[in-house]
Amino acid sequence: MNGTAFSFTLNGTAAVALPSGALLLPSERLLCISDLHLGKSERMARRRGVMLPPYETRATLDRLALDLDATQPACVVALGDSFDDLAASEALDPEDRARLVALQDGRRWIWIEGNHDAGPNAQDGEGHASLTVAGLTFRHIAEPGAAPGEVSGHYHPKFGLPGFGDRRPCFLLDASRLVLPAYGTYTGGLDARDPALRSLLADRALAILTGSRAIPVPLPGAQRVGQRV
């Protein structure tokens, strides 16, 4: 990964935070992504009459294809809110659907249920409420007081530093849990210092910024900030 990723250990399992926002477990040949929100432009048009350029699904799948080519996982875990709602999974453009099928070919593909897609979607693969692998439990929304080794998504955390420009999507990591950034193209975010997020994490936590490389920085304490999801 050309020195652009960040390696760490969570509950005894070696893991790698990729600059794209994906998580790799090398020993398990497992790649995890969260909050793809595929079909968001279709859902916005259907529910609100808001017309967004309908290319976010293709852009997200293009980025995922690059990660799959680079890591060659045997298993992919999509950590919930993979689709902007269940109807969006049925309304995928035929070309995007074919691309998703091709990405799934030859590997185990697990859809964790999220709050946007709480139920079986229209795509191939396995559906689970949560999944435990190699001492890590994958679920969509973090649970206060969860056992060590929790990996979750949902909050779309973002964080920035002076000199780094705008806030970037980021992983949030402490000694017992990890929160993934949103992987999808049309996703907002919640500041990592917001009490809803900061209260989940120990005092000594890291924000791992995504972008051209994964950059770990200490996460400050909570403050009152606005939400953009």
Image: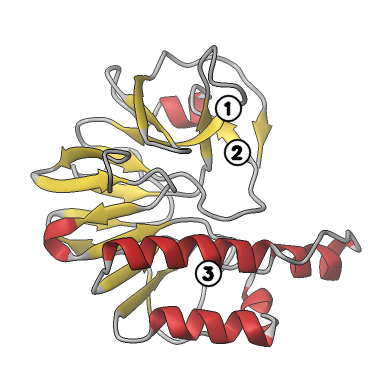
Callout 3: SS: loop
- Residue named by callout 2: 189
Residue 179 location in percent, x, y?
Answer: 38, 42
Kindly report the distance in space between the C-alpha atoms of the residues bearing marks 1 and 2: 9 Å
Q: In the figure, is residue 219 to the left or right of 116? A: left
Would you place residue 168 above or below residue 128 in this image?
above
Residue 149 location in percent, x, y?
Answer: 20, 46
Which quarter of the figure is the C terminus placed in? top right
- Residue 118 numbered mark, or none: 3
Amino acid bearing label 2: Gly
Callout 1: SS: loop
Kindly report the distance in space between the C-alpha atoms of the residues bearing marks 1 and 3: 29 Å
Residue 26 location in percent, x, y?
Answer: 17, 57
Dots 2, 3 in contact, CB < 8 A? no
Amino acid bearing label 1: Arg
- Residue named by callout 1: 167
Would you place residue 93 above or below residue 112 in this image?
below
Q: Is residue 219 visible?
A: yes
Q: Is residue 82 visible?
A: no
Name which quarter of the figure residue 105 lies in.
bottom left
Of the image marks 1 and 2, the number of the one nearer the N terminus: 1
Of the image marks 2 and 3, the number of the one nearer the N terminus: 3
Q: Nearer the viewer, mark 1 or mark 3?
A: 1
Dots 1, 2 in contact, CB < 8 A? yes
From the viewer's side, name the closer residue of 185 and 172: 185
Q: In the figure, is residue 141 to the left or right of 98? A: left
Q: Nearer the viewer, mark 1 or mark 2?
A: 1
Q: Residue at x 67, y 62 (%)?
A: 56
Amino acid bearing label 3: Ala
Would you place residue 215 above or below residue 38 in this image?
above
Mark 3 neighbour density, 10 Å: few (under 14) some (14–19) many (20 or more)? some
From the viewer's side, name the closer residue of 177 and 105: 105
